[in-house]
Image (cartoon, helix red, strand yellow):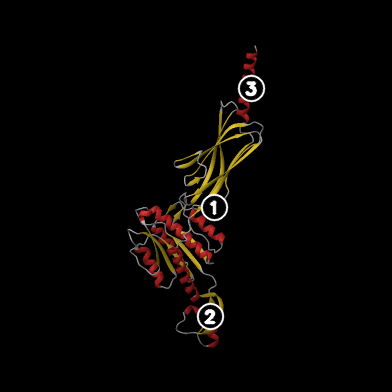
């Protein structure tokens, strides 16, 4: 008789807990996964915080939290993970009623980009491990992984050379917005400098005098069409890294920079261009732009960008073109700019086995050893 009563009680308990878990297993259950940093650089360390909170009294003896992250993230703890096209993680918890568990997962990013974790799959079991319950929670955490910055001696020397040449040109340029007087016209002066009112009063041609420009400006123009068949992705990433590195050197020296490219975001939309800026926050915006590049446009699109930016030229702006593409249609345009006194520089990464056929005074080459890539 006691055995029968025990069996009946067990069945009642089993049925009650089944009903309770079926109705209440996810009540008061909150799970979040949040990157603790908004951005990071390639090869730096960052953290992802996973929080599981069970506000009800009903315990969850077995709870699995599953999510996928980019395969370019290398987590410190890899026991509960597998890597294929993505990094799949499966963390197990035993959560008592009213308990909150926090885990901080450290990782290193190995590739620049904009990455999101958009959903978490939750799987729980009842007290007797006989029933499984599941749901998907939507989350919205994201992080920018910025391109690597070059600090090697060849790059530093190249950046200093460009900065030094820009400084020399800067000293020779006058600012049309800072008037400091007039003087008599000479054959060296352009017609646009003539002050016609002063000339009428004096009966002589008089020209305006201006102070030197107070702000240097740079247009960074990135071409992602490499025109290279062998390991083109590597050289394209190198162009992005060089753009970030030279932008950092410019802003560090107080030079106002804007950025435009023929790149596309991960959804195939044009990246457009940024505004000018020289602050540390502006450099972050430049790196976000570069991190967000997911695709490329062609050389024709880049030539159109270059033509458009040159049409808007104010005579006081320097142009820095980063491009592995060096065909005649681009070089002819840059030759024209150079020959007409425009401050133009071109940074060209190239593979050692193919060499660099184009030789111009404004070109700064960066050799890449093909067998080391």
Tell me if residue 211 comes above or below residue 153 in the rendering. below
Q: Could you tell me which secondary element the residue under label 3 belongs to? A: helix
For marks 1 and 2 on the same chain, the one whose residue lies earlier in the sequence: 1
The residue to which callout 3 is attached is 13
Q: Residue 327 in the image: x percent, y percent?
A: 35, 62
Please identify the quarter of the rendering in which residue 85 is found: top left
**Percent x, y of residue 182:** 54, 83
Q: Distance from label 1 to label 3 (Cα)? A: 51 Å
Spot occupied by residue 233 in the image (x, y as percentages of width and height): 40, 52
3D distance between C-alphas at marks 2 and 3: 96 Å
Residue 106: x, y in percent?
54, 46
Could you tell which of marks 1 and 3 lies nearer the N-terminus?
A: 3
Q: Residue at x 45, y 82 (%)?
A: 188
Which of discs 1 and 2 lies nearer the camera? The answer is 1
Give the residue at mark 1: 39
Label 1: few (<14), some or many (≥20) within 10 Å? some
For disc 2, the marked residue is 209
Left or right of 4, for residue 106 = left
Q: Is residue 24 visible?
A: yes
Height in image: 371 above or below 59? below
For label 2, the SS is: strand
For label 2, count other residues whose C-alpha is less than 10 Å away and answer few (under 14), some (14-19) or many (20+).
some
Q: Is residue 164 left or right of residue 324?
A: right
> Could you give the CA–CA distance between mark 1 and mark 2, rounded to whole angstroms?
47 Å
Q: Nearer the viewer, residue 172 or 1?
A: 1
In the displayed orientation, state which residue is furthest to the bottom: 203
> Which image quarter is the N terminus in?
top right
The answer, for residue 313, to whether it is visible in the render is no
Q: Is residue 90 above or below residue 318?
A: above
In the rendered view, would you say 75 is above or below 202?
above
What residue sits 48% from the left and 78% below the top?
A: 192
């Amino acid at each position: 008789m006691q055995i029968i009563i025990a069996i009946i009680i067990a069945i009642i308990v089993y049925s009650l807990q089944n009903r309770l878990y079926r109705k209440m297993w996810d009540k008061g259950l909150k799970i979040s996964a949040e990157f603790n940093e908004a951005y990071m650089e390639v090869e730096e360390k960052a953290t992802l915080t996973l929080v599981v909170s069970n506000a009800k009294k009903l315990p969850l003896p077995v709870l699995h939290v599953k999510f996928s992250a980019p395969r370019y993230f290398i987590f410190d703890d890899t026991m509960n993970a597998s890597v294929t096209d993505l990094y799949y993680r499966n963390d197990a918890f035993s959560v008592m009623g009213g308990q909150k568990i926090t885990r901080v997962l450290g990782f290193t990013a190995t590739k620049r980009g904009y990455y999101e974790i958009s959903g978490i799959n939750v799987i729980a079991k009842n007290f007797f491990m006989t029933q499984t319950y599941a749901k998907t929670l939507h989350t919205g955490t994201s992080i920018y992984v910025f391109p690597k910055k070059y600090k090697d001696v060849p790059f530093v020397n190249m950046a200093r050379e460009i900065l030094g040449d820009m400084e020399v040109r800067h000293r020779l340029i006058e600012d049309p917005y800072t008037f400091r007087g007039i003087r008599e016209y000479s054959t060296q002066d352009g017609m646009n400098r003539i002050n016609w009112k002063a000339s009428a009063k004096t009966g002589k041609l008089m020209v305006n005098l201006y102070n030197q420009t107070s702000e240097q400006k740079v247009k960074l123009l990135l071409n992602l069409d490499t025109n290279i068949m062998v390991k083109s992705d590597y050289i394209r990433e190198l162009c992005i890294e060089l753009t970030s590195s030279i932008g950092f050197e410019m802003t560090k020296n107080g030079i106002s920079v804007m950025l435009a490219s023929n790149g596309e975001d991960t959804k195939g939309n044009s990246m457009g261009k940024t505004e000018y800026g020289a602050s540390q926050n502006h450099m972050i915006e430049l790196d976000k732009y570069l991190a967000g590049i997911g695709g490329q446009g062609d050389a024709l699109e880049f030539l159109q960008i270059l033509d458009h930016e040159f049409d808007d030229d104010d005579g006081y702006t320097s142009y820095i073109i980063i491009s592995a593409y060096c065909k005649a249609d681009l070089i002819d345009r840059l030759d024209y700019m150079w020959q007409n006194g425009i401050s133009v520089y071109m940074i060209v990464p190239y593979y050692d086995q193919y060499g660099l056929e184009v030789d111009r005074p404004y070109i700064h080459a960066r050799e890449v050893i093909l067998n080391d890539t």
